[in-house]
């Protein structure tokens, strides 16, 4: 069992930056691939970024590529999402997730945080 707790959401102007954190509690954090997903009002949850257990590779949705960076610190049991050059369309609830597979698919992740709201004003 893994518990995930996100933090760092808030209100930011277009062009600004935010850094989300996700702290993991429970089983060995380093044994899981980690992902960030987001869900805007009235829309399905969508993939944003993922990182392998060892941090050797990461993958991004086209909509965030070049603006967002996912990273992890296995010593601190934490995964981060640095969001730069933010746009109003980035407004959503952001969720971190842990799974055994490095994947863009929600069903591949076994554990989810409660989400943190990110709002980008124009």
Image: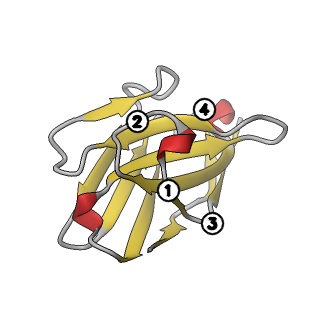
Element carrying mark 2: loop
Give the labeled residue for mark 1.
Answer: 110
**In the image, residue 87 lies at what x, y percent?**
60, 32
Distance of label 2 from label 4 (alpha carbons): 25 Å
Q: Is residue 95 above or below residue 27?
A: above
Q: Return the mark for residue 103.
A: 2
**In the image, residue 109 lies at what x, y percent?**
48, 49
- Circle 3 packing at 10 Å, graded few (<14), some (14-19), many (20+), is some
- Residue at the image position 48 percent from the left and 43 percent from the top: 108
The picture quadrant where one finds residue 40 is top right
Give the labeled residue for mark 4.
Answer: 87
Of labels 2 and 1, earlier in sequence is 2
Q: Do labels 2 and 4 touch, CB within 8 Å?
A: no
Q: Mark yes or no: residue 104 visible.
A: yes
Element carrying mark 4: loop
Element carrying mark 3: loop
Q: Return the mark for residue 114.
A: 3
Q: Is residue 118 above or below residue 66?
A: below
Left or right position of 111 against 13:
left
- Circle 2 packing at 10 Å, graded few (<14), some (14-19), many (20+), is many
Q: Mark yes or no: residue 119 visible.
A: no
Distance of label 1 from label 4 (alpha carbons): 29 Å
Q: Do labels 3 and 2 touch, CB within 8 Å?
A: no
Which is closer to the viewer, label 3 or label 2?
2
Left or right position of 17 against 51:
right
Q: Do labels 3 and 4 touch, CB within 8 Å?
A: no
Distance of label 3 from label 4 (alpha carbons): 23 Å
Which is closer to the viewer, label 1 or label 4?
1
The picture quadrant where one finds residue 14 is top right
């Amino acid at each position: 069992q893994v518990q995930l707790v996100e933090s760092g959401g808030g209100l930011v102007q277009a062009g600004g930056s935010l850094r989300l954190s996700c702290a993991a509690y429970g089983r060995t954090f380093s044994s899981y691939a980690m992902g960030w997903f987001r869900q805007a009002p009235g829309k399905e949850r969508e993939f944003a970024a993922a990182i392998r257990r060892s941090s050797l590779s990461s993958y991004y949705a086209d909509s965030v590529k070049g603006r967002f960076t996912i990273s992890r610190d296995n010593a601190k049991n934490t995964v981060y999402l640095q969001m730069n050059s933010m746009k109003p369309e980035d407004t959503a609830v952001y969720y971190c997730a842990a799974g055994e597979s490095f994947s863009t698919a929600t069903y591949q992740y076994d554990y989810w945080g409660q989400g943190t709201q990110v709002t980008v004003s124009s």
